[in-house]
Image (cartoon, rainbow, N blue to C red):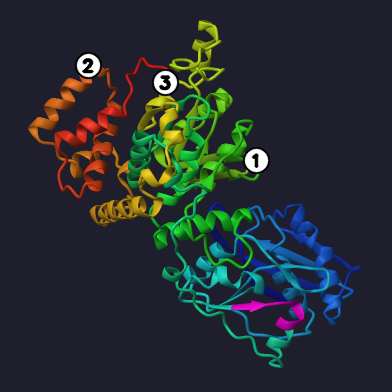
Amino acid sequence: MLAKITSGAKVGLNATLVDVEVDVAEQGLPSLTIVGLPDKAVEESKERVRSAIKNSGADFPLSRITVNLAPADLPKMGPAYDLPIALGILIASGQIRPEISDFLFFGELSLDGSLRHTNGILPMAYLAKEKRLKKVFIPKVNKEEAAVVGGIEVYPIESLLELVRFFAKTVIIEPAKKVNLNTLLVRSEAEFDFSEIIGQEQAKRAMEIAAAGGHNIFMKGTPGSGKTMLARALPGILPTLTEDEALEVTKIYSITGNLPLGCAIVTTRPFRSPHHTTSRIGLIGGSSNPAPGEISLAHRGVLFLDEFPEFPRHVLESLRQPMEDGVVTISRAKGSVTYPAQFILVAASNPCPCGYYGDPKKACKCLPGVISRYQKRVSGPILDRIDLHIDVPSVETQKLVEKDNKIKRENSKVIQKRVQQAREVQIRRFRETKLKSNSEMTTKDVKKYCPLSDDCRTMLTSAVATMNITARSYFKVIKIARTIADLGSSAKISPIHLAEALQYRPKDDDGI
């Protein structure tokens, strides 16, 4: 007898339908064969399914069983086909006879028949909605994740036995309640509050601009000046995720297994801080079965690269295309996958190996050649792709010893309100496009959304001539000025906004 179960396969951040066809032959030696390009995890489902069926009180047929995962030319990976294979065997052997033509099944089985947490549930729920399937059967532990998708009925099940009894109508399984995203999205928590950062007013202002417009930022300063503290305080002033952004991020965390257990979605903007020994595959993504890297896990959030020049040069150079396009395409022999990578890059560096080059208080011990080689570790094209460049000097002794009650510093909550208002202005500005922030504008978008007055053009013309600004930097200055204007609730870019934006652009012949 032949049974056909509908399931799905992950392809990048999306999913495609997979038909699990199970044939139990009356003749032939007892065996279980899986075809259709299964990987090792799918091959091992034979033993999991066999034990799960027996431990659920059902009979595992002593027949020649063939399982086909169609389409046969699409690689099948992971243990999520356990449930549809087990269900197909029970149906094909005549032990149950449910009507499941418009249902989707997805989940990993334990040896006792219970269903385990399974990665990639959210893309499957969207697949079911897209293909107009009525019901989705998934592990109960994943129900919150699938419940954010409307238009489908999500049935959370604890075990194979419960599913069999449900089809026998001896137990009732209630569909999961729809999750309202608006009630889940919250402001990001940060390790530090901006009110805890002593001095560094210019750096704080640059961080506010970076958060408001989604701009990349590079900090250079001596050890202990507060670069890491500033970077780790940045999540506290980022705007709240929109529903679309939250779902984008959740898809990435769902397929990689990084979504916290029992969570429906990622509710705050990600903050990723890989060590400088991270490989290119770890940062960009890859392996034989292309998986997202740190830049995709930081999508719509922050990627903090501390000790920037210490990263291998080939690793840093691999950031060029993602920083420009907001996506990364990974091509392997098995296929090509595109992952989103729209992040705020926060890079921090010392001016030299010892860290005190140019410091007025402590002498640098590095030789000139060593300093030059250190600064050349980060190439010009990478630096040119970073919007904001700031120096973070040592904190003055007087500010360190002053009592806190004498100085009133803005906290992260106050700054975040301004950032949120500026980002909402941008969302309204780009409502007819796919853009989310000023940093995502192309050259064509800059010309459309950032008209300049004659005074502004004159200032920019002078700046291009005196600062040797590249064409890319020219448009970055305008985008930064647009963000500064948004923070100031100004509908037009004025010379004062451009003047501040130009302060954050180094000359092209400067090193790090």
User: Residue at coordinates 34% horizontally, 50% vertically from top-left?
Assistant: 415
Say whether residue 468 is left or right of residue 406: left
Question: Dot 1 corresponds to which residue?
Answer: 287
Residue range (magenta)? 155-163
Q: CA distance from mark 2 to mark 1?
A: 46 Å
Q: Nearer the viewer, residue 124 or 425?
A: 425
Q: Are marks 2 and 1 in contact (CB under 8 Å)?
A: no
Mark 3–mark 2 Cα distance, whole angstroms, equals: 18 Å
* Mark drawn on residue 466: 2
In front: label 1 or label 3? 3
Q: Which residue is mark 3?
A: 380
Vertical side of 502 occupied by 428: above or below: below
Query: How much space separates mark 1 and mark 3, taking CA atoms?
Result: 29 Å
**Residue lying farthest to the bottom in this orientation:** 170
The amino acid type of the residue labelled 1 equals Ser
Residue at (28, 37) in percent of width and height? 480
